[in-house]
Amino acid sequence: MAASFSPRRHGDAEAGELLRVIRRPRLHPLFIFALLFTALFILHAPLLRLPYFWDEAGYYVPAARDLLLTGSLIPHSTATAAHPPLALAWLALWWKLSGYTPAVTRTAMLLVAALALLAVFRLASDVANLRVAVAATATTALYPVFFVQSSLAHADLAAAALLLWAIVFHVEHSRAGSVVAFCLAVLAKETAIVVPVAMALWELWWWARRRRGHDSRFAPPPMRLIASCSLALAPALMLAAWYAYHYARTGYVFGNPEFFQYNVGATLEPLRMLLALAKRLWQITGYMNLFLLTVAAAMAMAFPPQPDGGRPRERIALPVQAIFAVVIAAQVVFHSLVGGAPLARYLLASLPLVVIICVSTIWRRMRQWPVIIGIVCAGFVLAWFVNPPYPFTLEDNLAYRDYVLLHRRAAALVAAHHARERLLTAWPATDELSRPYLGYTKIAVPVVPLKDFSAPQLLAAARDPSQFDLALLFSTEYEPALDVSRGFPRWQRWQARFFGYHGGLPPEIAAQILGGHVIFRESRNGQWVALVAIERAENANLAQPLAVGNQSGSTVGVCR
C-alpha cells in the first residue's frame, strides 16, 4: 500500500545533530487532510453563512474583493495596510471558482485550517508518536481561538499554517521545503518573518559558540549552516520585494500612516511593552482555559516517565524543544513590541507548539493521560460558549457570533424601515450598512461616521443633530456582569490608555446626549445594540457644524 506519512520518534540528538528520523508505515496525508476538513466543516456548519465580522468587513474581504474585480494587489475600496496578498488571492480564487458568498469564504478558510492541523499532526508524529499526534491535533482544533479563526477571513491563520509546515520541513531536514514555506508565510502576512529570522539567529549563535570552543549542543553542522541562513535571507528578500512594489504603487512602505502609527508608532513605550508582554504570556499559557493544559503538564513533571515496552517513554528531543521555544519566544516578544491590539490570533503559529509539548509531557508521565486530555478538550469546548469574567476580544470565542447576529438584526430593521434616513454610527457598522456585499443588508444605507461612542464624540455629534436622523449604537467590548478587573482601577486605566479599552455608555444615556430616545434594543451575552430616533429641535439650523468624521458615508477602521 502506498504510504507517505508516518509517525516518527526521535531520541535526544548529539551535538550538532537535530534529529534522527525513523520511518514507519504511513497513512496518506490526503486521507488525514480530508478527515480533518470534514470534521471542521461539520463543527462550523452553523457559522458558515454568517456575515463578515470586524476586520473581515473592514479590510480583508474588501481588499480580496478588489483583487477579484480589478486584479489589483493594492486595495482601493479600503485603506491599504501593506499586508502581502497571498491570503487575499486565496479568497479571490475561491470566489472566482465558486461565487462570492460568506459560505464560500469560510469554507476556503476551513481548508487552510485543515492544512494547519495536518501540519500539527505531522509535526507531533515526527517528534513524538501517533498517540501524541492525534491528541495534540484534536486539542489544537478545539482550542477556542484556533476554532473560531478557522472560518474567519484573516491572514493570520494562513501565515500560521505555512509557518507550521516550515517547521515540519525544518525538523525533517528538508531545507528547500522549509525555505519555500517560509517565503509563502511572509507573503500571507508580513509578521511571519520573525520566525525564520529567530531560527537562523539561534543556529548562528550556537555555531559561534562552537567556533569559540564553548558548549555547542544545538549547533548545526557546518554544511547545514549555509542552508540555515537561507531560512531568514530568502523570505526577507521576498518580503522586501513586496514592500518595494507597495511603495512604488502607493508611496507608502508599511501601509497608510494611520495604520503604521496604530501598530508601530504608538506601541513603542516601555510600560506598554511590559503590559503587552504580560498579555502575550497569558495568551500562550492560560487564556481561554489553556491553563487546563499547561497546569496539567506542569503537574505531570512531578511524576516519573511511564514505562513503555520495558523502557521509559521518550521525551521530545531537546534540540526540537529548543526550536519550539525559540519560535514561541520570538513571536511573544515581537508581538509585545508591535501591534496596536494585542490579539490572540497573532500567536496562532506558537499555540500548536505549546500544545504538542504539553500533550507529550502528559502522555509521557501520566498513566491516565487520555482522561486528562479529554478534560482539557471539554474545557476548551466550554470556552466556546462561556465568556471569561473580564473584557476580551470578541473574535476569540463564539462571542463574535453574538455580535454578528445583533448587528444583522439591527441592519435589517434599518434597511426595512429607515433606509432613506441618515444614520449616525461608528466603524465597523458604517461599513456593514454602506456595503451590502458584507452580508448585513441588501441595500446601502447612508451613514454619518462617528469615531466611537465615548461621551466627547457623542457631545460633538449632538451639536448638530440636523445632520443625522437616527443613531445605531452598539457595545464595542464585552461587558461581563461580574468584571473581575473592576477591582484593579490602575489596570483599567492602563487598558484604556494603551489598548483602547473603555467602558461604553449605556444606550439610554447616549440617547439623552444625542437628544433622542431608544426605539429598539437587543442584548446577547454581555453585548447589545440599540437604535435611537433623534428628536428635532426648532433651532437646529443654528447649531454648529458636525465634526465627528468623514461625511462621505464611509469610514476607515484601523486594520489589525
Image (spheres, rainbow, N blue to C red):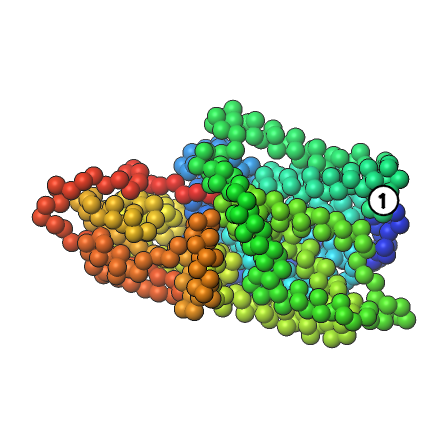
What is the number of callouts on the image?
Answer: 1
| Percent x, y of residue 338 | 55, 43
- Left or right? Give the position of 546 relative to 163: left
- Left or right? Give the position of 7 relative to 32: right
The part of the image, by quadrant, that contains residue 406 is bottom left
User: Which residue corresponds to mark 1?
Assistant: 216
Residue displayed at 71% across by 72% down: 370
User: Foreground: 490 or 358?
Assistant: 490
Q: In this picture, is 172 found above or below 510?
A: above
Q: In this picture, is 250 found above or below 23?
A: above
Residue at the extreme top of the image, as rendered: 248
Q: Can residue 408 be spotted in the picture?
A: no
Residue at the extreme left of the image, as rendered: 538
Residue displayed at 13% across by 45% down: 540
Task: Name the element at disc 1.
Answer: loop
| Percent x, y of residue 275 | 54, 52
Q: In this picture, is 534 found above or below 181?
A: below
Residue displayed at 71% across by 48% down: 326
User: Foreground: 333 or 331?
Assistant: 333
Q: Can residue 527 be spotted in the picture?
A: yes
User: Foreground: 540 or 88?
Assistant: 540
Q: In this picture, is 25 found above or below 537?
A: below
Amino acid type assigned to the residue bearing label 1 in the image: Ser
Residue displayed at 25% across by 61% down: 508
| Percent x, y of residue 175 | 77, 40
